[in-house]
Amino acid sequence: MNNAYHIIDVGRDSIEKVPIRDGFGKGLKRAGELDARVVAACADLTESTRMQAFAEAFPDRFIEIGIAEQNLVTIGSGLAAAGKIPFVSSYAAFSPGRNWEQIRTTICLNNQPVKIVGSHAGISVGPDGATHQMLEDLALMRVLPNMVVIAPCDSIEAEKATLAMVGDTRPNYLRLAREATPVITTPDTPFNIGSALVLESGADVTLIATGTMTYHALVAADNLYKDGIEAEVIHVATIKPLDEVTLLKSINKTKAVVTAEEGQIIGGLGGAVAELISENTFAVMRRIGMRDRFGESGAPDQLLAHFGLDAEHIRLSAHEVLAKKGSN
Amino acid sequence: MLNLKVRLTLTKDMLHKYSIDQLQMIANDIREDIIKMLEHAGSGHSAGPLGLADIFTALYFDVLNHDPKNPDWPDRDILILSNGHCVPVRYAAMARAGYLDREELMTLRQLGSRLQGHPERQRLPGLETTSGPLGSGLSQACGIALAHKMDHVLHRWVYVIMGDGETDEGNVWEAAMFAGSKHLGQLITIIDRNNIQIDGPTETVLALEDYKAKWEAFGWHVIEIDGNNIEEVIDACAMAKAIVEKPVTILAHTIPGKGVEFMEYDFHWHGSPPNHEQALTALKQLRTLGGKIKSEHE
């Protein structure tokens, strides 16, 4: 298989795992060094959202907001109005979970380049339970005009995404996960806001994944190869704007699609790809994600398997869409 | 009448260019424009904008350091209208100050107009934010004041206009706590204390009193004034600028619908425009007043 952009053997147990949020922390500090306009604000979660390194390096450019997420993003809007490039972070369940209207009016309609960082997104936040498992953020942010939505697949990509966001003049949402996540890209892997990345080529089925699920899609592709199926794996770091050209090229080739995300199947990546297909082409499709329900407490791996958010379920879904494609 | 054609080269020359009598005439003109705009638009809010006419006159024609011909002037003071539904008074004041032609006021709320029903920054130069949903102006002002503080910019003031009913919103108190905590001394809030909101009197809907004590408890200096007295507004702003160790709230007691007898004090006029006959009556009243709107204390 052609795996030009990820150099790891996904089957190995020894694969390096690093929390995606760590890459954000490194990227933010680097962004602070490169651009004096970069400032950061946090709602009492500085260490766990990984803003700590920036706060220590640039204490005069770090703002502790307190536990007030509506204030967090609206102060961000004001900072941007005054020429700063503000990164504002909390857990995704609270920001953008609690402050959506403020984001809509004071950032998106007002079109200020605030960088909203939602950490601890997805079911894999684990034992904290459903209240803290943010599964709706992609849909909430994707529906907003002007907003760019980015969900990196590993820490290296998160670092690149953070640096790229500094130069982007639009409102941005960056989705991060809590758990250590396999590192599947390298410093040389290209990253551009708005570009999807074909990680593996194949002609039978297209696996489209974002965030933490991209690793699972790669594992699924390896296992499908053993089943005699060549899967194309596309990592969609930028869910909005969607890289329609790259996706349609693959979808028109395979006519069979499985999407995978750690979020609701309604309105997120799966929703976006379904919209793309239905307006442009014909393909059999299945969405992997939370099926219109909330999560619960549990160990991250347990929960992912329980709710069908893993490589095995992607593999089975690929077989399903291929069977349907064959019967059409 | 005033000669508004005076070329404003250095905006500091604007300071005290107008006498209080002249400012009262301008406020009256702005009230007339508000009535005409709202009648023409057929929808919009009457009471708030009329009650705020004296405050906006004081700001745009005396207090603010600004340049209507260069709305993005980097050294300008910032004026944020948090209760966006009162924007007709801002549009009317901006037109009188030279930001736009007065003819354009009649496009309020029409398709393609720069004068949206609630203000949008990107549509009209001179608006600093986009507002309408209540409670978010103060925190944006905090962000701007904080950025100025970070950059050691001490000569720019950030003014926020809020409604009293608006401060039911939790976001306001998050911002109030933040500004007090960070000692944002360049921040001046003017609260339109007109005692009405859509469902009735503020003290019936959700009691705000002891209002002054609330703001003081959050770390603010509070000045109470008659908000329909232009001289008091100007003096309070000057006092607020002299208090640099704390943010300042000016509790401006105003009469909703001020200047139009049948609208005054009546919360039913919060969200309604006058019809043609009502507009004629209102304009006749305003013209008879001849700018003689004065403080109730005089």
Image (cartoon, rainbow, N blue to C red):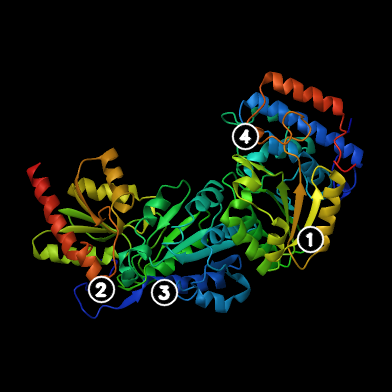
Asked if the residues shown at circle 1 and circle 2 are in contact, with their CB atoms under 8 angstroms apart, the answer is no
Q: Chain of mark 3?
A: A
Q: CA gap, disc 4 to disc 2?
A: 63 Å
Same chain? Circles 2 and 3: yes
**Among the two numbered marks 1 and 4 on one chain, the one whose residue lies closer to the N terminus:** 1
Same chain? Circles 1 and 4: yes
Same chain? Circles 4 and 2: no
Q: CA gap, disc 4 to disc 3?
A: 50 Å
Relative to A140, B145 lies left or right: right
Q: Amino acid at mark 1?
A: His
Q: Quadrant of the N terminus of chain B?
A: top right
Considering the numbered disc 3 on the image, is that residue within a helix, a strand or a loop? helix
Q: Is residue B263 above or below residue A42?
A: above
Residue closer to the observer: A297 or B245: A297
Relative to B63, A282 lies left or right: left
Residue located beneath label 3 in the image: A22
Q: Amino acid at mark 3?
A: Asp
Relative to A99, B228 lies left or right: right
Same chain? Circles 4 and 3: no
Checking the image for residue B271, the label placed there is 4
Q: Amino acid at mark 2?
A: Ile
User: Looking at the picture, how far across and down is residue B182, in whole percent?
Assistant: 67, 69
Q: Is residue B153 above or below residue B120?
A: below
Residue located beneath label 2 in the image: A8
